[in-house]
Image: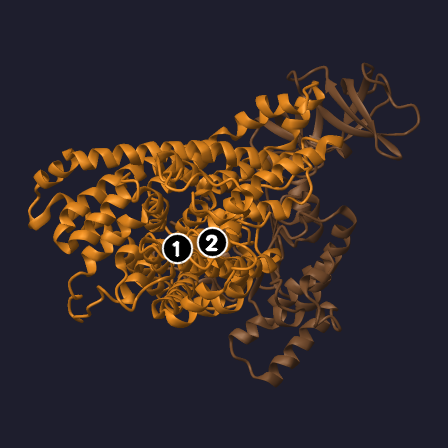
Amino acid sequence: MPPALDGIDLAIEDGELVAVLGPSGSGKTTLLRLIAGFEAPDAGTITLGTQLVADARRQMPPEHRRVGVVFQSFALWPHMTVKRNVGYPLEVRGVGRAEYERRVAAVLETVGLTGLEGRRPAELSGGQRQRVALARCLAMEATVVCLDEPLASLDVHLRATLQDELLAFHRSTGATMLYVTHDQAEAMALADRVAMLEGGRLLQVASPAELYSEPATPVVARFVGRGTVVPGRVLGRAEDGRYRVALLGTTAHLRGRPGHPAGPAFVCLRSEDVRPAAPGSGAVAAIVQRRAYQGGQWALEVAPVEGPPGTRLLLAVASEAPPAPGQTLELSIHDGWVLPTP
Amino acid sequence: MIGAGERVVLAGLALVIVLLAAVPFARLVQAGLSPGGRADLAPFRRILTAPPTWRATAHTLETGVGGAALAALLGTAVAVLVALTDIRTKGALVFAFMLPLMIAPQVTALAWSQALGPQSPLLRLLGLAPPPGAPHPLYSAGGIVLLLGLQQAPLVFLAVRAAFRGIPRELIEAARAAGARPPRVLATVVLPLASPALLAGTSLAFVGAIGNFGIPALLGIPGRYAVLTTLIYQRLAGLGPAVLAEVAALSLLLAGMALAGVALQSWSAGRRDVRVIPQPAPPLWHLGRKRWRLELAAWLLVGVLALLPLVALLTASLVPAPGVTLTRANATLDAYAFVLREHPPTRRAFRNSAALAGSAAVLLAGLAMPLGYFLVWRRTPGLRALATLAELPYALPGIVLAIAMILVLLRPLPLVHWHLYNTPWIILLAYLARFLALALRPVVSGYQQLDPALEEAARMAGAGFGYRLRTVVVPLLAPVAVAGALLVFLTAFSELTVSALLWSAGAETVGVVVFSLEQGGDSVAAAAVAVLSVAATIAAMLAGSALARRVPAGGLPWHA
């Protein structure tokens, strides 16, 4: 059986919000559980601050790591009130009564739940429950807060509200946060940096902008922002600092890593990189495969005439008189990214 | 990743299970196959080839298979009624149908022999009694098969009903959409899908039937119809510890048959997907205007099977002397006064049974909680094997366990020199071994329905093992632990099979008192004690039903 995680080398700075992004089965929950202490590594080390907390031989148990976890189900104890749920880490440590009351009150105010101390989790809304789970991590003064797909089971509108709350929480507390998710839009919206996982391997760790515009591998290019990957040939550098690249029967000036050698390469194209061109001046001829109305514009999926069979490009056109399936369209490519050679 | 404190608890649990489950049976195997210290199969072979053994084995198989078949028929019929139709009063029907399972087998036998015997006060009241001097119709193989079937039918019912509930609704709806009417859906879709569960339940009924002591003792001994359990009892009760080797060999034979049944049950239970949590589904069969006829038939059936015997028992306890017809004029509570005020063994027995059953219930609930934790949430390897070991004393016949316990505790314990044989302690230890599996099952199913993240969150917050158990696990699982304890108490309070061989003067149990009163001829007093024990059982069942909302489905078997 292939390992659940392989060759992970990741450093998270103090106060950063790092999103761990990947499809199901990519190992992102395993990574979170390793950091929290619920799984043990077979090789390698995990260090929190200056302290080595896990290696192949010995692991510090979760009770001692001070890593806060917001579970997917929130894991609020149903037989305890909000106050006892939040104050549980303090209760465990035997904090005195006055100090306990003070800290719980302060934490509840930070997350905006003052007045709800006596309620049970069953009486709270989804957003309130998330805040209780966060407050619990705050109360234990966790060094890092790990969130395991906390918004996965919520509806779209609630998700947007809670994302804002998470960002506000991050800003006001400056907590280091590790956010595991399969939703790339969520990762891009929340994170300072995104670590992209697939099949247990780390594909790229970069800021959302860099991940989007400069993906490191075809998998990243396709997963983030629905990019298409097409084969091409790098001919050399152009005057504007970009690379001259031959693809799909035309030439274009595309971005790439410094020092990219000439020769065959793959190119990542996004829908904003491709535009309809005036007939005759266009560089790429393509046949429209299907179109879908998206409110204010049409999303087109086109098959270039030149280029490997099965290649599809995506682009958006304005609502008036969009081309119908089967029609030929002329396109120009004015931006794109040359994927680094492995 | 197990901390030091957890390791100690785990080791303790393993030690307790090994001592309770493995040591007695190991000793039994040793005594049967190598009596006198050396491996010597000659005595074993001699006993196996003796004619009484063969006869008893044949009778055991006969009644076991017959009883299991009857149980399968009855249990499936009632399961179809309850799970697939829309008859009313299901709750009460299930409660009444489950009564024979919760009531001690010998009480059932006593009740039925009163109901159908030539001296039955009830039949005399109705004018249906057979002539005096006629052989009792139940004192025969047929009677034993009938009562074993009745006793075990609830087991099959539970298994089959769970299977019915687990069938995805779409499969049934697809058949109806294709034009099939309910009887055809039942025959072509529902029953085939439920057949592994039916086979599993029937195997369990077989194992229960061959291990039963109370019914063949009451009905078979008078008619000289011996099965293995009564043969073992008569040998030991008649000749004492001198025949332990021979009795051990007989027990091994019985255990072997039971293990075959358990293996069949495991195999057939493993053939279906048990991950689906059975949910009550809307009824398949809407009975329409003829419904009341089926309801009447159902209540008639359940009434005859469960309630008639209890009524017979009651009337038998109110007559002034055995064999007298009950009339309003001569109904008397003298028997009750006798057993409660003038018969010291009965008072002692109630005290002993309450203490033994109560202690066993509390101790086993306390054991089941951490055991269930390691089994379900930590999935410690090797613990599954231990859990299967813990099932043995419950799956195998009680008589076998009693013999094993005698073998282990006959001589004083090493080091501490405690004499536990002929004291109540040997009975308590036997109860702990036998009913551990009973206490464990609802607890395990409770853990399976809880979110493991609840405990991980407590670890994350810094709580150690003991603190987590106390503040998170125990409060959440208290209802299921209580359900398990209640089941143990109910079963242990009036049981006979185990205490028949382990009791001693001063350490009588309720089951033993009923048995000896009946064997001694005082059937009125026996009936009185039996009625009192049934009353206690029903009271406890009702108390349990009050809890039922907090217990996950299936925790309390008599709750619909």
Q: Quadrant of residue A71?
A: bottom right
Identify whether B413 is placed above or below A34: below
Q: Chain of mark 1?
A: B
Q: Residue at x 70, y 59 (%)?
A: A166
Q: Position of residue B285 (x, y in %)?
A: 68, 30
Out of B34 and B441, give the one closest to the viewer. B34
Q: Position of residue B112 (x, y in %)?
A: 45, 45
Out of B141 and A123, give the one closest to the viewer. B141
- Label 2: how many Cα within 10 Å (few below 14, some 14–19, many 20+): many
Q: Quadrant of residue A318?
A: top right
What amino acid type should be assigned to the residue bearing mark 1?
A: Ser
Report which residue position mark 1 lands on. B523
Q: Position of residue A201 (x, y in %)?
A: 50, 41
What amino acid type should be assigned to the residue bearing mark 2?
A: Ala
Report which residue position mark 2 lands on. B316
**Name of the residue lying farthest toward the right:** A320
Colour-to-chain, orange: B
Secondary structure beneath dot 1 equals helix
Identify whether A303 is placed above or below A66: above
